[in-house]
Image (tube, helix red, strand yellow):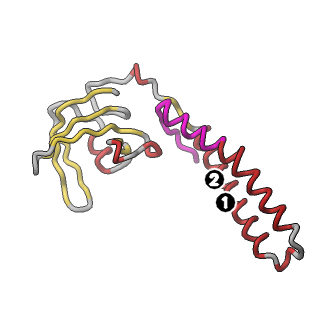
């Protein structure tokens, strides 16, 4: 069963670039490693050949998964997104009720999440807890060490 994933133009471009790199650079390298190992003699006792074949299998699996992901990827039309509620690609300004810290996160697809850049996955506990909220709402989010309460201060688009 395949699931549809939504991506920004930037995220979709990165996926395509990674797939092209694996196909155009890594696949030929893998084939060459197998050919080099095959040239070294008896294949029944050739650990280098076995390792190269296994590496090739893992590479092909990775390529296959990326192809499937891309086939189910949909580009998000950012101009059609509603800013009254927290959705994918919303940038949300929050205030932690417990310590008063003000944070800002952009909700993105799981593959685009990067906490250092302030991008959190919509499938993360915080992302799930924020989806559908409006300015003025309080988001109660259950995390491993308890429940956090955030005031939704602002919702915007990039």
x and y, in percent, of residue 83 in the image: 29, 24
Position of 47 relative to 59 (above/below): below
- Where on the picture, by quarter, is residue 31? bottom right
Tell me if label 1 and label 2 are in contact, CB under 8 Å: yes
Query: In front here: 87 or 21?
Result: 21
Rendered residue at 63%/43% (across/down): 19
Which quarter of the image is occupied by the C terminus? top left
**Distance of mark 1 from mark 2, alpha carbons?**
6 Å
Question: Where is residue 17 drawn, in percent x and y?
Answer: 60, 39
Q: Which residue is mark 2?
A: 62
- Kindly indicate the quadrant of the structure image that contains residue 50: bottom right
Write down the residue under mark 1: 58
Q: Per the image, is 18 magenta? A: yes
Secondary element under disc 1, as helix, strand or loop, is: helix
Q: State left or right for residue 107 relative to residue 68.
A: left
> Where 41 falls versus 13 (above or below)?
below
**Range of magenta residues:** 1-20
Q: Residue at x 71, y 60 (%)?
A: 57
**Label ID, residue 50:** none
The number of numbered discs placed on residues in the rendered structure image is 2
């Amino acid at each position: 069963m395949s699931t549809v994933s939504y991506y920004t133009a930037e995220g979709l471009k990165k996926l395509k670039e990674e797939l092209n790199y694996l196909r155009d650079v890594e696949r030929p390298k893998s084939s060459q490693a197998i050919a080099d190992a095959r040239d070294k003699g008896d294949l029944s006792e050739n650990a280098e050949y076995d390792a190269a074949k296994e590496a090739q299998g893992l590479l092909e699996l990775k390529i296959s998964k990326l192809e499937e992901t891309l086939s189910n990827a949909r580009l998000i039309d950012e101009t059609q997104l509603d800013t009254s509620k927290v959705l994918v690609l919303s940038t949300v300004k929050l205030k932690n009720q417990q310590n008063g810290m003000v944070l800002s996160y952009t909700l993105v697809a799981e593959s685009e999440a990067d906490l250092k850049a302030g991008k959190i996955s919509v499938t993360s506990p915080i992302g799930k807890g924020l989806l559908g909220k409006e300015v003025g709402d309080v988001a109660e989010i259950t995390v491993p060490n308890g429940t956090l309460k955030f005031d939704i201060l602002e919702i915007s688009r990039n």
